[in-house]
Amino acid sequence: MSIKVTRLEDAEPRARDVAIGTFDGVHLGHRAVIEGMDTVLTFEPHPLEVLHPDKAPKLINSLEVKRDVLDGLGVEELVVIHFDEEFSHRSAEEFISYALVEKLGARRVAVGENFHFGAKARGTPAMLAAHPEFETRIQKMVEVDGETVSSSRIRAEIAAGDMEGARRCLGVPYMLEGEVVGGERRGRELGFPTANIVPDPRLVTPGHGIYAAFANGHPAAVNVGTRPTFDSDLGVLIETYLIDFSGDLYGQTLRVAFVAKLRDELAFDDVDALVARMHGDVDDARRICADFTEAAARGG
């Protein structure tokens, strides 16, 4: 990883080309804003978590996943504004003079056409464009399949299990990560040991079902749900079976990249029927992951 992560207050003065936004998901619309810029300025936590917690969305990415996606895009520096009540009171002009001019030395700035900033969201792209200290590029919205790409659209696709739709908007598979925790060890007893993650309540969770995915780069079959065949008190888990993998992952961070939904989560009449279906799920996941890898190698 080559990207540098900096808190705004610690940023060292230098000439920067700055893309500004929350960039939740770093989707194709965000990528259009970021293209050609060496620095991304973002907010953590999401401003709505501070200003209107009841209206705050479930996020697509953790800051760590966002960082790594930006690194893959060639961004040199991720500058993070710790967004709190105090910062929310800064006027739009204060934001420009302090963050962009004083701290970041912006020579070029890029934002989406719907970007607003400053106290009461009074700052607009036009206000940025009126400032002579830097050049401003205002990026129009991007469409996929005739519909505007937005974080809210992608959240809905993920929640519905539409990983292909989410991927078309994100440009890459939807990814989540978490620490592997202990479970009820039923998967191991059935011949399919799983690495279990408890969903982060701040983040969107894929719709319940079985998925083909990559886990830390390994092809995997993933169950998201509550295991209805058994009585369980653990609630929703993300249970990942890494295909052709052996090793102890407890306590480690597992990153799961979802490729496609295989089926809904089902309650089976007996364990034998469940195990037979799990074998089929693993075969399907293996095939889909192989096809995905081959298509990616071709540039498709």
Image (cartoon, rainbow, N blue to C red):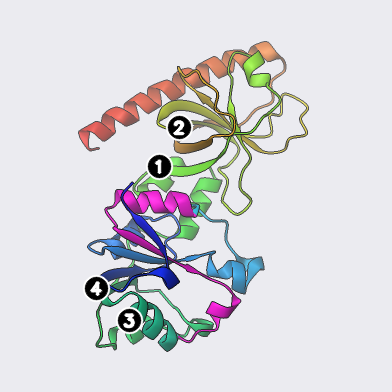
Q: Is residue 125 visible?
A: no
Q: Is residue 224 above or below residue 34?
A: above
- The residue labelled by disc 4 is 15
Question: Could you tell me how far apart the alpha carbons at marks 4 and 1 are, in whole angstroms?
Answer: 33 Å
Residue 250 visible in this rendered orientation of the protein:
yes
Mark 2 → mark 1, Cα distance in angstroms: 9 Å
Q: Nearer the viewer, mark 4 or mark 1?
A: 4
- Assign a secondary structure to mark 2: strand
Name the residue that disc number 2 marks.
213
- N-terminal-most mark, 2 or 1: 1
Task: Tell me the mark number nearer the camera, choosing from 3 and 1.
Answer: 3
- Give the Cα separation between the discs numbered 3 and 2: 43 Å
Measured from the top left, where is residue 295 in percent x and y?
27, 32
The span from disc 3 to disc 4 (Cα, nearest Å) is: 10 Å
Q: Give, as a three-letter code, the residue at label 3.
A: Val
Q: Which kind of residue does numbered mark 4 sit on?
A: Ala
The residue carrying pointer 1 sits among few (fewer than 14), some (14 to 19) or many (20 or more) residues within 10 Å by Cα, namely many
Binning the other alpha carbons within 10 Å of mark 3 as few (below 14), some (14 to 19) or many (20 upward) gives some
Mark earlier in primary sequence (2, 4): 4
**Quarter of the figure with the C terminus:** top left
Cβ atoms under marks 3 and 4 closer than 8 Å: no
Q: Position of residue 239 (x, y in %)?
A: 59, 30
Asked whether disc 2 touches disc 1, contact meaning CB atoms under 8 Å apart, the reply is yes
Q: Element at badge 1?
A: loop
Span of residues in magenta: 63-91
Residue behind mark 1: 173
Residue at (50%, 43%) from the top-left corner? 176
Q: Position of residue 37 (x, y in %)?
A: 26, 64
